[in-house]
C-alpha cells in the first residue's frame, strides 16, 4: 500500500513538474497592457471598438500582439511575455467587451 502511494505521488510530480501554471489574463493585462489600453484604443470594455476585432478571432489578435501592430511594439514591448501570457491577456480583453 505504501509503495502504491509513493509511486502515485512520484508520478504526479513528474507529470506536472514541467508544466507552467496557466497565465491569468487579468493579471497579465493589469501588469503589461492596462497603461496603454486605458489611453489608446481599443480601450478595455469598449464594445464598439472591440466588436470587429473579436470577429477576427483570438489567434489573429494574439498574433498582432506577438508581432506588433501600429504603435504597439512586438510583444507589447515586453519580450518576457510568453505566447500563453499574451493569449490569456487577449482572451481577458475580449471577454470584457462582450
Image (tube, helix red, strand yellow):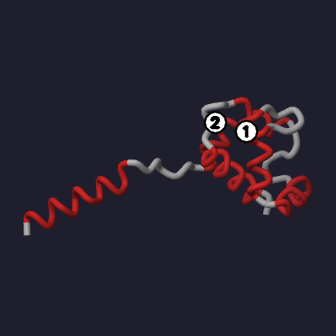
The C terminus lies in quadrant: bottom right
Helix, strand or loop at mark 2: helix
Residue at point 85%, 63% (across, down): 55
Lateral position of residue 85 relative to residue 48, left or right? left
3 left or right of 29 in image:
left
Residue 2: x and y in percent read 8, 64
Quarter of the view holding residue 33: top right
**What secondary structure is marked by label 1?**
helix
Q: Residue 27: name its quadrant.
A: top right
Of 89 and 82, nearer the camera is: 82
Is residue 25 shown left or right of residue 70? left
State the image coordinates of residue 89 (x, y, percent, origin top left). Answer: 67, 48
The image shows residue 81, relative to residue 45, as above or below, that is above
Q: Which residue is mark 2?
A: 31
Task: Tell me the quadrant of the picture where the N terminus can be found.
Answer: bottom left
Circle 1 residue: 34
- Compared with 20, 68 (above or below) is above
> At which x and y percent is residue 35?
75, 33
Residue at the location (76% across, 42% down)? 65
- Give me the C-alpha separation between circle 2 and circle 1: 7 Å
Q: How many marks?
A: 2
Q: Residue 84, labelled with which disc? A: none
Q: Is residue 58 above or below residue 34?
A: below
Q: Quadrant of residue 71?
A: top right
Tag 2 and tag 1, C-beta contact below 8 Å: yes
In the rendering, at what x and y percent does residue 47 appear?
86, 58
Q: Residues within 10 Å of mark 1 (few under 14, many from 20)?
A: some
- Work out whether residue 82 or residue 89 is closer to the camera in this orientation and state it: 82
At 52% from the left and 52% from the top, the residue drawn is 22
Amino acid at each position: 500500500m505504501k509503495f502504491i502511494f509513493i509511486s502515485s505521488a512520484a508520478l504526479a510530480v513528474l507529470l506536472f513538474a514541467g508544466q507552467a501554471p496557466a497565465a491569468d489574463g487579468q493579471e497579465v493585462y493589469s501588469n503589461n497592457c492596462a497603461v496603454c489600453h486605458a489611453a489608446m484604443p481599443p480601450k478595455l470594455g469598449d464594445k464598439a471598438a472591440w466588436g470587429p476585432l473579436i470577429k477576427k478571432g483570438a489567434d489573429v489578435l494574439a498574433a498582432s500582439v506577438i508581432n506588433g501592430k501600429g504603435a504597439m511594439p512586438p510583444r507589447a514591448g515586453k519580450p518576457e511575455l510568453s505566447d500563453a501570457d499574451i493569449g490569456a491577456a487577449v482572451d481577458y480583453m475580449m471577454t470584457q467587451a462582450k
